[in-house]
Amino acid sequence: MFHEIIVLLWLAVLPAILWAIPKTRRMTGSWITALKTVPLGCLTIWLLPTVFCCMIYWLHRPALRNALLELGCLAVGFAVGIFLIMKLARWSWRRWHAEGKRSILPFDVIFLFFAFSTVSISWAIPIVQYSSNMGEFHGEWQSFRLSDENGVKITFEQRPIHPFLAEYDYRLAFRRNGTTVFRNLLTNTGGRTHFNLYRLKDGRLLFSDKDGDYIVDPNLPEVWYLHETDGRKYAVPFPHERLRSWSWEMEDDTMMFRYNYGCAIPAIPLTDELEGKVYYGCITNDFYLEAGKQAPSLEKRRFN
């Protein structure tokens, strides 16, 4: 959000000042007219696709999230921005009776300058924030609504933890009777992934991605983290705090889940809980209900 505000100010402040001052408002030279109009056109080109994407996330319309439609929205924003520049420039020249030859060169130069600077700001500010507070960069949470379970509204949420690499915090939000409870999943530090969702025979859900498997009980609500070794499966309640370290160790015939340099939870052996699971959906750039289809393959990455 911070860098969006900076971009907005960068593109809006200069033309606002030039239009507000009577002397510069009446000036009709090509360069001053370009400075009064081009940043507003660039703002339109940047703002329209941004608003479009925000509306998609707000309305939870995964069918609208595709590259072709986003490219089309960008093209519309570009066309509207250029049209705005031309209309404002012509209105200004007519309003104050501009005379003499007018050049398009200032418009091209200033457009390229503001376009390049806007992209640079959008990239530079998150990188500076991350560099100044290494490891503590957090973007905004994105929410993907899942299917309701017994009156419980479930939302999968993610937020970037790096300004440009595909690294994310993941969590689930359970909402019932006006109360929302959050449960964490493992932080993804190894590239964008997808989750396969299954329904278990006891009604609970199984979430599976490249980093791990989780049994999710919407009624409690609670999340169990799964581990498999030597053909045996174990489950532990996933800690509510963020994991900074973790490991699995066998101690006196009990599998222990150790985390955050000193905390430990005994694991519960699983028997047939995962047998007969039925695939019913996938989380990629949103939640897609795909009952009856084949689950997308996952290349598992195991932690010791």
Image (cartoon, helix red, strand yellow):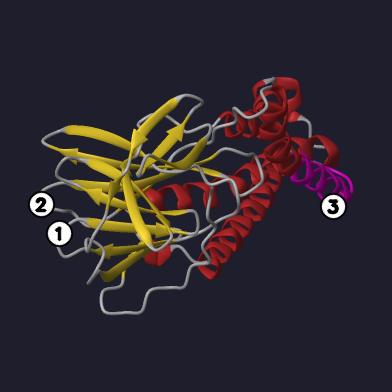
* Residue drawn at the location 61% of the way across and 33% of the way down: 8
Question: Residue 21 in magenta?
Answer: no
Residue range of the region highlighted in magenta in the rendering: 99-117
For residue 96, say whether it is visible.
Answer: no
Tell me if mark 3 has few (under 14), some (14-19) or many (20+) residues whose alpha carbon lies within 10 angstroms of its own: few
- What residue is shown with label 1? 203
6 relative to 272, above or below: above
| Proximity of marks 2 and 3: CB atoms separated by less than 8 Å | no
Per the picture, the main secondary structure of the magenta-coloured stretch is helix
At 26% from the left and 50% from the top, the residue drawn is 216
Q: Earlier in the sequence, mark 1 or mark 2?
A: 2
Q: Amino acid at mark 1?
A: Gly
At mark 2, the secondary structure is loop
Q: CA distance from mark 2 to mark 3?
A: 63 Å
- Residue at the location (39% across, 59% down)? 208
Marks counted in the figure total 3
Asked which quadrant contains residue 37, the reply is top right
| CA distance for labels 1 and 2 | 10 Å
Q: Which residue is mark 2?
A: 150
Q: Name the residue tied to disc 3.
A: 104
Specify few, some or many for label 1: CA neighbours under 10 Å numbering under 14, 14-19, or 20 or more.
some
Residue 149 is situated, as x and y percent measured from the top left of the image, at: 15, 53
Compare marks 2 and 3 and give the one earlier in the sequence.
Answer: 3
Q: Residue furthest front?
A: 252
Which label number is shown at residue 195? none
